[in-house]
Amino acid sequence: MLDNTETGETSAWCVSDNNVKNNYVEIDAGKPMHVLGVVVQGRNTGQYVTRFRIEYGSKVELIYHYQMPMKECL
């Protein structure tokens, strides 16, 4: 969930157009930190994530693509 720390509200993100490629969510943690996991959840309307990728870095020039080991995909 996306949390708004100012209001305490939570919400979700979804694409505005399913036919557009390269929809994304960008999260700025504010400082370097370890991320232990990513959780995705579908909606009760039959919409759900079919694939995603994780990229990370501290500068735009230094963006890395995370490749998950195949045994962790099961």
Image: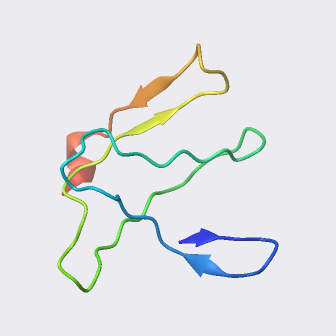
Coordinates of residue 47 in the picture (x, y in percent): 22, 72
Q: Is residue 25 above or below residue 31?
A: below
- Identify the residue at image location x=59%, y=13%: 61
* Percent x, y of residue 64: 47, 24
**Which quadrant would residue 18 be assigned to in this image?**
bottom left
Question: Which residue is most to the bottom?
Answer: 44
Q: Is residue 14 above or below residue 19?
A: below
Q: Position of residue 32 (x, y in %)?
A: 73, 38
Image point (48%, 72%), residue name: 12
Residue at x-position 71% and y-position 71%: 4
Residue found at the very far top of the displayed protein: 61
Residue at 28% over, 74% down: 42
The C terminus sits in image quarter: bottom left
Determine which quarter of the picture holds residue 58: top right
- Left or right relative to 59: residue 49: left
Where does residue 51 sit, x and y in percent of width and height?
Answer: 23, 50
Asked whether, in this view, residue 70 is left or right of residue 9, the answer is: left
Image color mode: rainbow
Q: Is residue 4 left or right of residue 35?
A: right
Tell me if 45 is positioned left or right of 23 in this view.
left
